[in-house]
């Protein structure tokens, strides 16, 4: 049966790459079983290296689910409390007395966003404090709990809380609390620990010349500030080194294999990190959201309720220049799946940024057949 599934996954990825994606890697796990993997395309166009299951991809905002799970583990151990004011750990945070620790990871903090204004300076090393300071310089702060609004800044601050509460690095805590317990040896917090860079698939970015006036993000405008860093071009450009890992930190610095990401969700929903009451803190306390070019419809803490293959799923999507990822768990069947690509765009409505959703529909359908 696994051989049949592998062949179906392979056909889906081959067709996906044939439409213009450079490379892709996928994995499916069902209720603690062995992962079934498939890869297609190239990890390095210049050297003609094909993608293998061992290749690492930047997983972007899928990092957030690992960070939220780490926070839950620390709350379970009594190291911190989810409902305590963030000001306990971040005394200089504006409105920190009204922002709860849990709000940092459920997108209800009202914190200003930095992502769209962050300078793309290859080689620059950012501190978490510099990222937060940038956010408050470029955007206004909203009231906590008014609406659910996607917040990378909240996750940067969640990483800072984890470090303040434990006296350890974020990378060290993610490894101790999540990666090691689940045996995930092919996932790394790249801003805070070394990883085998020779296994990183190179990322490729599509930035075509604009056809007219600048569009808003909802209309398909650019997500990142790239002027002066990456020129307009109709051809894909290597963007591997464009965004330093430290500029993402807890909001998106991880690199993983598709196998590890599917195993992570399998372990998370299978109760191998904590009991159901803690999973409920992530998955079942949700608020409606809507983001162009995504399937995310309701936000929990590190998990979004989405729709793939006509079914409700829980997981996350990630994008970082040159890479797009999605990982989802279907509760009824106990099936977890991940799809990673090394082709992306700042236009979330473009095929390079959102074409993986249709491919993931097919992957999940094949897994559930």
Image: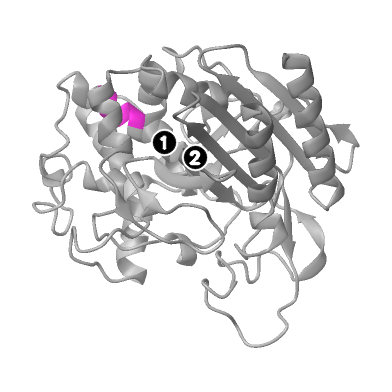
Cα–Cα gap, marks 1 and 2:
6 Å
Judge the density around disc 1: few (<14), some (14-19), many (≥20) Cα neighbours within 10 Å. Answer: many
Q: Is residue 350 visible?
A: yes
| Circle 1/circle 2 CB separation < 8 Å | yes
Majority secondary structure of the magenta segment? helix
Q: Looking at the image, which is closer to me, 27 or 128?
A: 27
On whether residue 91 falls in the magenta region, the answer is no
Residue bearing the label numbered 2: 62
The local secondary structure at tag 1 comes to helix
Indicate the quadrant where residue 160 lies. top left
Left or right for 23, reference 341? right
On whether residue 72 falls in the magenta region, the answer is yes
Query: Which residue is located at x 17 percent, y 45 percent?
Result: 90
Q: Looking at the image, which is closer to me, 92 or 145?
A: 145
The region drawn magenta spans 69-73
Indicate the quadrant where residue 210 lies. bottom right
Q: Is residue 121 above or below residue 63?
A: below
Q: Quadrant of the N terminus?
A: top right
Judge the density around disc 2: few (<14), some (14-19), many (≥20) Cα neighbours within 10 Å. Answer: many
Residue bearing the label numbered 1: 65
Q: Residue furthest bottom?
A: 213
Q: Is residue 218 above or below residue 361?
A: below
Q: Is residue 166 visible?
A: no
The local secondary structure at tag 2 comes to helix
Residue 36, image x, y percentages: 68, 19
Query: Which residue is located at x 30 percent, y 24 percent?
Result: 168
Residue 257, image x, y percentages: 63, 27
């Amino acid at each position: 049966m696994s051989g049949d599934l592998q062949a179906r996954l392979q056909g889906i990825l081959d067709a996906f790459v044939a439409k213009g994606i450079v490379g892709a890697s996928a994995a499916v796990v069902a209720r603690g079983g062995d992962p079934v993997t498939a890869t297609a395309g190239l990890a390095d166009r210049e050297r003609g290296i094909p993608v293998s299951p061992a290749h690492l991809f930047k997983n972007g905002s899928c990092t957030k689910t690992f960070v939220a799970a780490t926070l839950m583990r620390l709350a379970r151990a009594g190291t911190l409390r989810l409902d305590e004011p963030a000001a306990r750990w971040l005394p200089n945070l504006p409105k920190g007395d009204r922002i709860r620790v849990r709000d940092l990871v459920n997108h209800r903090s009202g914190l200003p966003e930095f992502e769209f204004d962050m300078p793309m300076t290859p080689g620059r090393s950012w501190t978490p404090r510099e990222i937060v300071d940038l956010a408050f310089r470029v955007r206004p702060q909203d009231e906590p709990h008014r609406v659910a609004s996607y917040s990378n800044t909240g996750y940067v601050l969640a990483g800072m809380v984890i470090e303040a509460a434990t006296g350890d690095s974020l990378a060290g805590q993610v490894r101790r609390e999540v990666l090691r317990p689940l045996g995930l040896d092919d996932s790394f917090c790249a801003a805070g620990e070394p990883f085998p860079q020779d296994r990183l698939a190179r990322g490729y970015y599509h930035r075509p010349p604009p056809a007219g006036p600048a569009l808003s993000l909802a209309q398909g405008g650019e997500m990142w500030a790239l002027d002066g860093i990456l020129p307009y071009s109709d051809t894909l450009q290597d963007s591997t080194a464009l965004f330093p890992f430290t500029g993402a930190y807890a909001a998106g610095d991880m690199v993983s294999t598709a196998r590890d990401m599917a195993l992570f969700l399998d372990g998370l929903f299978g109760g191998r990190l904590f009991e159901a009451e803690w999973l409920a803190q992530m998955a079942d306390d949700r608020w409606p959201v809507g983001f162009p070019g995504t399937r995310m419809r309701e936000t929990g803490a590190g998990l979004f309720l989405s729709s793939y293959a006509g079914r409700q799923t829980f997981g996350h999507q990630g994008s970082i220049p040159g890479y797009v990822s999605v990982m989802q768990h279907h509760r009824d069947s106990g099936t977890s799946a991940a799809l990673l690509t090394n082709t992306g765009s700042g236009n979330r409505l473009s095929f390079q940024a959102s074409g993986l959703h249709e491919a993931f529909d097919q992957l999940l359908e094949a897994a559930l057949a």
